[in-house]
Structures are given as C-alpha cells and as structure tokens.
Image: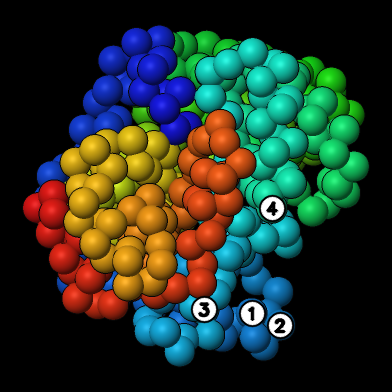
Amino acid sequence: MNAAKIALTALACTSAASALQLPPSMPSTNGMSRRSAVSSLVTSSTAALASGAASPLLVPPFIANADDVATQATSVMLNSKNKKTFPLASFGLQIYDDDTAYRLTLTALEVGYRNFFASVLAGNQKGFAKAIKASGIPRDELYICGTVLSNRANGEQAAYQKSKQGCLENMAAMAAGNIDKLDMIMLDYPGPNEESIRGQWRAFEEMLSKDKTVDDLAVSNFSPSQLDAILANPDAIKPTVNQLPFSLTYHPEGILEYNAKRNILVQSWSPLSRVLPRYGKTLESIGKKYGKSSAQVGLRWIVQNGASFTTQSKSKNHFQEDLDVFDFVLTDDEMTQLTKLAA
C-alpha cells in the first residue's frame, strides 16, 4: 500500500479509518510476548520445512540470533496451498503514470526485486504489467499482488458484486503484460460491517477456487474483529497477509500477536515515511556499526520483529538499499532501544 494509500485515504469510507484504529494495548497471545509468539511459529514451521512436510505453514522471518539458520531468510511460506515463497521485500507502485510505472518496475527487477505490490489505487497496473512482460524474467520467479477497492459497498451482495468487478478489472489490466494469473489479490480496505466483509471475501474465494486466477488471498488494514468476520466461517479460505502501517512509529502492543495467532503475516506499508524524519539520527547512529543506512536499520527492525515490508523508490540506489537488509542482525539491546522510541 505504501504512500499511495495515505494519499488516497480520502477515497475510502469511514470503515477504513476505524480499521486503522487498532487497540492501543492488547493482551499478549495466550500470555506470550511478541518475541515468543513469532518465535514459536518459526520453530515449528522451520522444522516442518526441513522434514519436507507438505502442510502449508507460515514462517515468520523471526531472528533469534546471528547464528540462527533463519538469519539470511529473504522469503517465507504463507499459510496457503501455494508452494511459491513470499519475498519479504516488496516494491509497491505509487501514484504515477503507466510510463513511470513501466520504467520503475524494470529498475526494481534489475536490482533484484521479485515481489510486487500493484495496487489499483496507483492507477498504473497496465504499465507495470507491460514491464513484467518486457523484462523476460520467467513468470514463476515473480510474486505479483493486485488489489481490490470495494469498501464503500454496504451489504453482502453489494460488496460481493463490487469485489467481483474489482477482481475482473485487475485481470483485464494485467492482461496488458500477458499476466493471466496473480499470486495474490488483496482487499485494500475492509467493508463497513461484517456482512459486507463476508461479501468481499466471497468474491475473493471465487477468484481462487472457481476462476483460478489467483493463488493467495490477503487483506489490508484489518483489525482482529474484521479478520474474524472471515474466519468465523470454518470453511473460509484464510487470509495469508494483513498489510498494516506497522513501523517504528506505529507498533501498538498486540499488532503482531493478533495476526500471528491467526497464522497471518504482517506486511508493513509506508514503513519509513514517518520514521526517517522523526528517528533518522538514532537509526543512522546504529547503522554505522553495520555499514548500513538509517532506512536499512528501520526496515531491518521490521523484519526482525517477524513482519515483511513493501517500499517505494524512484532511484536505483534506493531500490538496492531497501533490498539490502538481510545480511546483518540487530542486537537485542538495539531492537529494544528502537522499539521504545515510539513508546
């Protein structure tokens, strides 16, 4: 979602704002701390992967210490039947024309990005898709996420129809690059009530199970109760990712735990926009030890907390910088220092 969603918040209905008003304090998952919650998941998931277990498991990129086998992990398995891994670093397209989207997508691909967040809000999915085609990179090496904006539709049927239309519009835009299947489709915002959310999700489930034009389903800006509007149905396909404004400036207690409890990976949107102006000097000081920039330290904090991120850039150097955060590990003391900045 990134800055595009901030710029277009006015387009969303009031439910979007309420979705972001997460509880300032939530009890830990079954008495577990944030570190324990994500650590327990990575322990069981890593063991399952090592044994060749077929069951889909979420593997949060939690870092126990510098010697941990997961230290260099750059992608994770999601809680779905999709066998393709989900890269932790994603390029999220912003609001600009198709030609700019085309150029920046090619730059991101050249640098090494393989996860792309092409939101309908940005209005340039066609330019993005054309760049994917022009790159010549095999489709199975890329993870592509589209989005649907249907949060203003009120009621199950209205939300279903609007979301269904959005799914079809994504595929029509992606056809410009001969992309006939997405890796993920994401709801940009939840509907205004549980009934509407269930309608949104019905359209998504049909896109996966009936149309077979997507492999993973995801949400954005969902609170615990909004997630449970979906999960209350035991037969529902589970969301794999919840995209939230998780960052050094916004990390209320429980934000990671309530997603981990539901086996959902948090993806941070706009992970640096408010962080660098406020805490840049502190991040820079820590980064000197590792030869890293303040931005890289801010992104590393997200990864070590068990989340992923999507960033945007217009320069090749910044693209590379944001991707180069998987070769160092912050100490426990540094993590604690950074976490307390916005306490």
Q: Residues within 10 Å of mark 1 (few under 14, many from 20)?
A: some
Q: Position of residue 152 (x, y in %)?
A: 42, 11
Q: Secondary structure at mark 3?
A: loop
Distance between mark 1 and mark 2 Cα atoms: 5 Å
Q: Residue at x 51, y 36 (%)?
A: 312
Residue behind mark 2: 52
Residue count near mark 3 (Cα–Cα under 10 Å), binned few <14, some 14–19, many ≥20 = some
Residue at left offset 82%, top offset 26%: 130
Residue type at the position of mark 4: Gly
Q: CA distance from mark 3 to mark 2?
A: 17 Å
Residue designated by label 1: 49
Cα separation, mark 1 vs mark 3, equals 12 Å
**Residue drawn at 13 percent across, 54 percent down:** 341
Q: Nearer the viewer, mark 1 or mark 3?
A: 3
First in sequence: mark 3 or mark 4? 3
Amino acid on which the number 3 mark rests in the picture: Ala
Sequence-first disc among 1 and 3:
1
| Cα separation between marks 2 and 4 | 28 Å
Name the residue tied to disc 4.
112
**Which of the 4 quarters of the picture holds residue 339?**
bottom left
Q: What amino acid is labelled 2 in the image? A: Gly
Q: Position of residue 103 (x, y in %)?
A: 71, 27
User: Do labels 1 and 2 touch, CB within 8 Å?
Assistant: yes
Who is closer to the viewer here, 248 or 234? 248
CA–CA distance in space, label 1 to label 4: 25 Å
| 3 or 2: tag closer to the N-terminus | 2
Q: Position of residue 45 (x, y in %)?
A: 53, 76
Pick whichever of labels 1 and 4 is earlier in the sequence: 1
Q: What is the spatial separation of the Cα atoms under label 3 and label 4, in whole angstroms?
A: 20 Å
Q: Which mark is residue 70?
A: 3
Q: Is residue 176 left or right of residue 237?
A: right
Q: Secondary structure at mark 4?
A: loop
